[in-house]
């Protein structure tokens, strides 16, 4: 996996080239250098933007709980139901399960234990048709 440091270095090289400078020496590149062609320069700008977005995603991902994106097990669902039945706070449940509050609320909604209007997070993960069946 590419590290944040590698992204910063590559971005720095591209930004120098975009400015028409040699990334190693800082010397101005000749006007006929390939990096001074408009399509090449635009492509490098797009690459820098994509790298910045990828780095931002990496940084956000590092801050997420460890179980984000993992499949729910039957045992974990049983534990969730028991915790919710005991009125444990959802943020505490989320911490115990290593998941986000949104994931806990979505699972509770899918299990029919929480209505979408009771969620503190945005969006419903249950289709309108399924929600009507629960009512």
Image (cartoon, rainbow, N blue to C red):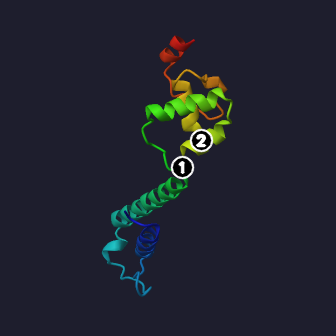
Answer yes or no: is residue 99 visible. Answer: no
Residue 4, percent from left and from top: 46, 67
- Helix, strand, or loop for circle 1? loop
- State the quadrant of the N terminus: bottom left
Give whichever of 89, 43 is nearer the camera. Answer: 89
Answer yes or no: is residue 17 visible. Answer: yes
Query: Dot 2 corresponds to which residue?
Result: 94
Q: Is residue 87 above or below residue 9?
A: above
User: Few, some or many C-alpha atoms within 10 Å of disc 2 (few <14, some 14-19, many ≥20)?
Assistant: some
Q: Is residue 38 above or below residue 20?
A: above
Query: Residue 12 vs residue 113: left or right?
Result: left
Distance between mark 1 and mark 2 Cα atoms = 9 Å
Query: Residue 15 vs residue 96: left or right?
Result: left
- Helix, strand, or loop for circle 2? helix
Give whichever of 95, 13 is nearer the camera. Answer: 95
Give whichever of 11, 89 is nearer the camera. Answer: 89
**Residue depicted at 34% across the width and 69% down the height:** 37
User: Few, some or many C-alpha atoms within 10 Å of disc 1 (few <14, some 14-19, many ≥20)?
Assistant: some
**Quadrant assignment, res 112:** top right
Query: Dot 1 corresponds to which residue?
Result: 65
Dots 1, 2 in contact, CB < 8 A? yes
Q: How many marks?
A: 2
**Quadrant assignment, res 74:** top left
**Residue depicted at 50% across the width and 53% down the height:** 61
Residue 22, percent from left and from top: 39, 82
Mark positioned earlier in the residue sequence (1 or 2): 1
Residue 104, percent from left and from top: 56, 35
Give whichever of 45, 96 is nearer the camera. Answer: 96
């Amino acid at each position: 996996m590419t590290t944040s440091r590698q992204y910063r270095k590559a971005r720095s090289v591209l930004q120098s080239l975009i400015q028409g400078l040699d990334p190693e020496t800082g010397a101005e590149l000749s006007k006929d250098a390939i990096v001074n062609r408009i399509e090449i320069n635009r492509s490098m700008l797009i690459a820098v933007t994509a790298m910045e977005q990828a780095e931002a995603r990496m940084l956000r991902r590092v801050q997420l709980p460890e179980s984000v994106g993992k499949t729910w097990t039957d045992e974990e669902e049983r534990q969730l139901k028991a915790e919710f039945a005991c009125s444990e706070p959802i943020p505490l449940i989320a911490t115990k399960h290593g998941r986000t509050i949104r994931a806990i609320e979505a699972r509770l909604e899918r299990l029919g234990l929480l209505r979408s209007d009771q969620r503190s997070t945005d969006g419903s993960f249950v289709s309108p048709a399924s929600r009507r069946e629960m009512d």
